[in-house]
Image (cartoon, rainbow, N blue to C red):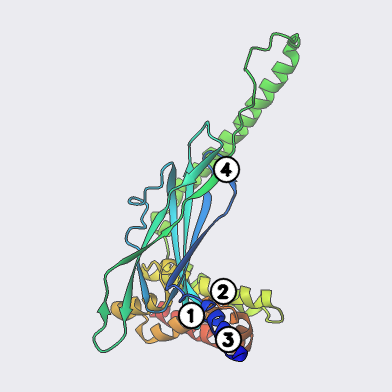
Amino acid sequence: MLASLLLCAFGAQAASKKTAPEPKVSVSARLGKTAVWVGDLLPYTIRAIHDRDVEFALDNLKRGSLALAPFVVRGITVEHGEWSPNKKLLEITLQLTTYEIGKSDLTIPPIHLYYFIREAGVGRKENQAETIQVPATRVGLRSTLTGGQLRPRDFKVPSPVDFTEIAAFLFLGLVGLSVVGVRGAQWVWKIARVPKAKRRPFARHARERLVHESLTKIRAIGFDSDEESARFYHEISSFVRGYLEQSLDLEAPCLTPGEIERALQQSGTNGALAREIRDLLERCEAVKYSRDGLSQARERHREALEDVEKIAAAMRRELAG
């Protein structure tokens, strides 16, 4: 009888310890600074870890439509990545600033993120949009104002005026302005005489130089340490995205590898290399966001170097054509 009671007690305790199911989306926010001066930029990062069947709708995250008074949105950056075998990562970085005065702290209003849960299958079904709220965050506001009552300086004898020092400083100021004026005139004359054809942005020779310099820098990076491996894949990603942005009029830094692949296939430019470019960029992002990305990156260092050299060779052929 006693054994039966003990088994029932242990069973009830185990049932009470069952954890609730893990949510499909979890959000957190962090500040680049705990306090900010008036007019300074404040990085505000929102991190969302979500299931793979979750897709976010980010149409409301635009500078013109995102109201975060008393803060003003100066820039928005969105990055997608891998978090774990069953989870993905979404990072939204807002560059905020404020011009409020007379307060010791301010509050960043809550932000709503909208997402869909897509059901896999032959006919993919899109459910109704759900929302999750990023809680409000308090930020300290620094001030250069001093405490106490302001009053004229009537308790200290003014220093005597030395006209010799005034004349010397005036002469030095005129000499400095003359030097600045001469240098400015030379710069304006040089710019005015440059033919307009040479000032055209993203010229062919500039793209060729970008390919050559980036490839040289990538080859020079070793892979003996985690820092070198991380820098190696960062340089590869920066080179590929920068080239696509400059030569193909594609906002590559803001797109995921899959979106870049689809854009290349639709445009017909570099279509044959679209899949290779996507795979290479996914490896670069895995190094940054995946927990075991650096260990896998070391093993595939030479393979990544061969892939980027192949892509660079294809870019050279395009430039020669």
Quarter the C terminus occupies: bottom left
Q: CA distance from mark 3 to mark 4?
A: 57 Å
* Marking on residue 5: 3
Residue tagged 4: 140
Nearest to the eye among marks 4 and 1: give it.
Answer: 4
Q: Position of residue 183 (x, y in %)?
A: 58, 39
Residue type, label 2: Lys
Nearest to the eye among marks 2 and 4: give it.
Answer: 4
Q: Is residue 12 above or below residue 67?
A: below
Q: Which of the marked residues, 2 or 4, is nearer the chain's N terminus?
A: 4
Marks 2/1 in contact by CB < 8 Å: the verdict is: no
Residue type, label 4: Gly
Marks 2/4 in contact by CB < 8 Å: the verdict is: no
Query: Residue at 53% of width from left, 31% of height from top?
Result: 102
* Marking on residue 288: 2
Dot 2 surroundings within 10 Å: few (below 14), some, or many (20 or more)?
some
Marks 3/4 in contact by CB < 8 Å: the verdict is: no
Quarter the N terminus occupies: bottom right
Q: Position of residue 37 (x, y in %)?
A: 57, 40
Residue type, label 3: Leu
Dot 1 surroundings within 10 Å: few (below 14), some, or many (20 or more)?
some
Q: Which of the marked residues, 2 or 1, is nearer the chain's N terminus?
A: 1
Q: Is residue 289 left or right of residue 202?
A: right
Q: CA distance from mark 2 to mark 4?
A: 31 Å
Question: Considering the numbered disc 2 on the image, is that residue within a helix, a strand or a loop?
Answer: helix
Marks 4/1 in contact by CB < 8 Å: the verdict is: no
Toward the left, the furthest residue is: 123
Q: CA distance from mark 3 to mark 1?
A: 56 Å
Q: Which of the marked residues, 4 or 1, is nearer the chain's N terminus?
A: 4
Task: Tell which of 179 and 113 is nearer to you.
Answer: 113
